[in-house]
Each structure stands twice: as structure tokens, then as C-alpha cells.
Image (cartoon, grey):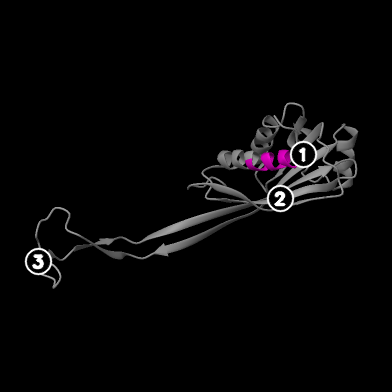
Amino acid sequence: MLLLTGCATSTIKSSWRDASTPAITPHRIAVFVSVKDDKNLRKMAENRVVQRMPKSVQATAGHLLELPPAPESDSVRRRLIDSGFDSALVARLVSVDKTQTVVPPQTRVGPDPLFWRVGPYYRPYYSPFFTYYPYSYETPGYTLETTRVVVETLLYRLPDAKPIWSAISESVNPESSIRLVDELIELLGKRLKDEGLLPPG
């Protein structure tokens, strides 16, 4: 579903942080990626997030814990607390939207670059030289497809499993699932570090 072609651009469209919660960096964090009906993509994404976590944070992929990506539920929250986790990072695929724009054929004109002197000519009032009409050519029509991937990312603080930070990101024309995940890791990881919710490095 996410194996798409094009030039990728990822941006954070909106973000929120609980101002009442101090910026305490996690020590043990569970990483969850919620992708419907695609277990391999979930495993790949969770593993890459864990690999890119700062060395001072002990991170574990959610699929290794055999838990669904729902730290809000009482059963998952209890399992995480009993296992010593103090935080959970959850990324949810919100939508993958494709739009098509049809560009019709166009007629373009230009000067005669090789001075073939083909075609009619005239002498303008303001110039003593002959001027040749430009040549024209047709460009074929084509269809431009744009794919937008929207992801919601939340950081939960345990033991109460309350979200303390969230962001909505949008990626346009991602080249592949791996490139999309790596882009979002860099983009969102920097924002979390800037806000003091992940340690640098």
C-alpha cells in the first residue's frame, strides 16, 4: 500500500503537547506502529524506530511484546507497567489518499533556433530586419498522480497512559515504505528532542 513512487516530502501539519507535564525523557519505551492488515510493515517500522532511538533510552518493538498498539487499554497498560516501561510511542496510519490531475495536450511556440528560415516572415515597423514566425510543437497530455500519507504519532507517559505529545504528519509521494519510515523518524525524532521529550544523540 505504501510502495509508492515520486519525490517524497514530509512535514508536520500540527502538533500538541501537554503543558502541564514536565519534559522528562523516557528510560524504557515501547514502540508501536499501527498499520491495518500489514504485519510485515509494522515489524519493519517498529524495528527501524527502535534502532534510531538514542542510546540512553532502552526501546522495545511492540510486536516483540506481542501486544496490540493500544497503550490506552487497561490490559496493555498493565502489561507495560509490569514489564518496567515508563513510556509508549504509538504511530498510526490515518490515511493514504491518491488524487489524479489530467494535464491536456498543449501547443507551444518558440523561435527558430537553427535559423532554418522556414515559414513566412515580415518586417516590423520598428526593425529594419526580417523577422521569421516562430515554430510550434505539441506536447502530449498526461496524468499526474499525487499520493498523500497521513500519520498520527503519540507519546504516552506511564503508568497513567496519558498522551503528553502528539503530531499529525503528511508525506507526499513517498518512494517506498522504508524511505517513508526513515523520513518520519528523522522529522518526528528531531521535534521530540527539541521539546525535551527525547534525549539528544
Q: Mark 3 points at which residue?
A: 128
Q: Which numbered dot is residue 69?
A: none
Compute the Cα span from label 3 to label 2.
Answer: 66 Å
User: What secondary structure is the stretch in magenta mostly built from?
Assistant: helix
Nearer the observer, disc 2 or disc 1? 1
Where does the image place residue 39, in percent across and percent down from the top left?
67, 41
Location of residue 26 by image quarter: top right
Q: Which numbered dot is residue 196?
A: 1
Q: In this view, does 57 lie to the left or right of 9?
A: right
Q: Residue furthest top?
A: 55
Query: Under tag 1, what secondary structure?
Result: loop
Amino acid type, residue under disc 1 in the picture: Gly
Q: Which residue does the image show at 36% across and 65% down from the upper left? A: 104
Query: Under tag 2, what secondary structure?
Result: strand
Compute the Cα span from label 2 to label 1.
Answer: 15 Å
Q: Residue furthest bottom?
A: 125
Where does the image place residue 158, in percent across and percent down from the top left?
87, 40
Q: In this view, does 183 lie to the left or right of 64?
A: left
Reply yes or no: does residue 42 show up in magenta.
no
Q: Which residue does the image show at 71% across and 50% down from the upper left? A: 167
Query: Under tag 3, what secondary structure?
Result: loop
Q: Is there any visible trace of residue 149 in the rendered image?
A: yes
Front residue (pair 154, 43): 154
Compute the Cα span from label 3 to label 1.
Answer: 72 Å
Q: Earlier in the sequence, mark 3 or mark 1?
A: 3
How crowded pointer 1 is (Cα within 10 Å; few <14, some 14-19, many 20+) is rated as some
Q: Which numbered dot is residue 167?
A: 2
Stretch of the chain drawn in magenta:
187-197
Amino acid type, residue under disc 2 in the picture: Ala
